[in-house]
Amino acid sequence: MLDTAYSSDKRRSIFAGVSPFILVPGVFVGLLIGHWLHKCLLMVLFQNKIIYMPSLPPGSRREKLEDYSKTWAGVSWEERQIRSLDGTKLAVAIARPGESSAAAQFKRKQIVVLYFQGNGASIPPRTPMLSNIIRAAAKDSPHDWTLLALSYRGYWTSSGRAHQRGIEKDVQAFVAWAVQTYGQDLENFELILWGQSIGAGVAAYAASKHLESAEDPNVVDKPAISRLILETPFVSIKSMLAAIYPDWWVPYKHLWPFLRSWWDSEDALRNVAQSHQLPKVLMVVASGDEIVPRVQADQLETLCKDLHLDVTRKDVLGALHTQASTLEQGKRVIATWMRDGEVP
């Protein structure tokens, strides 16, 4: 009893001589710092859950291509399974415009468009937009057109969980499979890469790796990439953190050393610029983008010019982040540039 009372008095005496005017603010500041550190820890631990959102909106992974078939208007879609470099099962959606497939034997060139989606939802709800663009690109074209849309690991019916190192394996396997499947006649084969939002970073990475391997003297029969479309792109995830959260006291931008996904388009484009066969670059920017600050596109455009890349920029008026390719102006720009290499 005496020992208990003594220890209790001793504990109470720790703050006995501290003024409430010092104690209360100190406790308050301590709680704020603790909350700040707790938030930082959660951001680091669950960053892949925040960056990659394959299940938003709910039910995205259960959607089927056929759910949107009434919107395709003459474009046929099918799903196929391929394997990533590490064996992970990946889903690929394949689109062919009706007139393109019907007259394939009379076409002079096979043009294959590889599409890399943004970080949310799945491929099926994107098929109406993709159908509109590939149909417009193929209209009155003397060539045979195919669009291939990759579902990264963890998305739609693909296996695994999404993370950058895994997705890098996915896109390398995807590009290699596309070339092997559709590029038998390399003299009459054209490859176009198109990515939206985080997919623009994925497309830039895919282009850099493909062109890097094409420069290897031990590698033969590697087709060049004729065009690279970056829709609502950003420089890197690190730069996005700094742009969205510029205040020093906001924790997120200070966590970049702990990033497990960075998707650095600047680094990828620098690698692309070292190739002997430079692709044309189209930047499609949403003028009303509520997610990616306009300065990101400005920096990438300046970078491309500094690297002597043939870059064209088109701002889609009134478009939000996900609308650059769904509004009429954006659809027309992308389809025309795919077909002619010029913007209307």
Image (tube, rainbow, N blue to C red):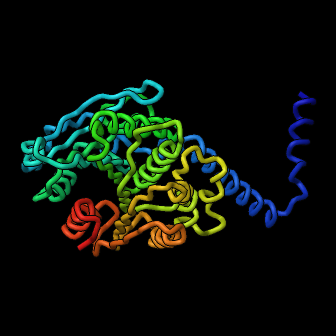
Q: Quadrant of residue 152?
A: top left
Left/right of residue 241 with respect to residue 51 in the rendered view: right
Q: Quadrant of the N terminus?
A: top right
- Percent position (x, y) of residue 52? 44, 44
Asked whether the viewer can see residue 125, the reply is no
Asked whether the viewer can see residue 47, the reply is yes
Residue placed at 90% from the left, 48% from the top? 13
- The count of marks equals 0
Residue placed at 60% from the left, 45% from the top? 44
Residue 41 or residue 100, whichever sits in front: 100
Q: Quadrant of residue 317?
A: bottom left
Residue 250 or residue 60, whichever sits in front: 60
Q: Is residue 283 above or below residue 48?
A: below
- Percent position (x, y) of residue 144? 17, 47
Q: Is residue 111 above or below residue 287?
A: above
Left/right of residue 206 with respect to residue 158 in the rendered view: right
Q: Quadrant of residue 22?
A: bottom right
Left/right of residue 278 with respect to residue 341 in the rendered view: right
- Percent position (x, y) of residue 192? 32, 52
Residue placed at 12% from the left, 43% from the top? 104
Q: Quadrant of the C terminus?
A: bottom left
